[in-house]
Amino acid sequence: DALTDNPAIITGSANFSIASTEQNDENMLVIQGDTAVADVYFTEFMRLFDHFFSRDKRNESLGKGSKSPRAWIDVVEDDSWMKPFFDPSHQLFRERVLLS
């Protein structure tokens, strides 16, 4: 978990397949306890995840016959969407603090 005090980052070209572990010339680096490195990896992960999640939701909505490029977005007319970002027990709070 990148948001803990003792994160573990596993990076490199190895992908844990049979070929990767037994045949190919792969590398793997385990970085334990470096919160600064974990913050960088987590930020990049969230950037990529949010990008592809949004694309997937848009494509999903277009597949249902919608012509609007923003059809998957539900408009919230009050501030209820903000609550998880300020609740310390919620993952979105921890992401907001980390990425701010």
Image (cartoon, helix red, strand yellow):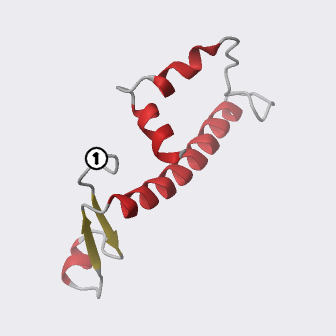
At which x and y percent is residue 70? Answer: 75, 32
Q: Is residue 78 above or below residue 8?
A: above
Residue at the image point whose x is 39% and y is 27% from the top: 90
Residue 30 located left or right of residue 37? left
Residue type at mark 1: give it.
Thr
Furthest-bottom residue in view? 25
At which x and y percent is residue 36? Answer: 39, 61
At which x and y percent is residue 89? Answer: 34, 26
Q: Is residue 17 above or below residue 63?
A: below
Task: Judge by depth and name the residue closer to the eye, 6 or 75.
Answer: 6
Q: Choose top left, top right, bottom left or bottom right for residue 23.
A: bottom left
Residue 68 located left or right of residue 11? right
User: Quick one: SS at disc 1?
Assistant: loop
Residue at the image point whose x is 68% and y is 26% from the top: 73
Split into 4 quadrants, where in the image is the C terminus? Answer: top right
What residue does disc 1 label? Answer: 4
Task: Judge by depth and name the residue closer to the eye, 92 or 56.
Answer: 92
Residue at the image point whose x is 29% and y is 48% from the top: 1
Task: Judge by depth and name the residue closer to the eye, 44 or 25.
Answer: 44
**Counting other residues with Cα less than 10 Å from the Cα at mark 1, is it few (<14), some (14-19), or many (20 or more)?**
few
Residue at the image point whose x is 29% and y is 88% from the top: 25
Furthest-top residue in view? 78
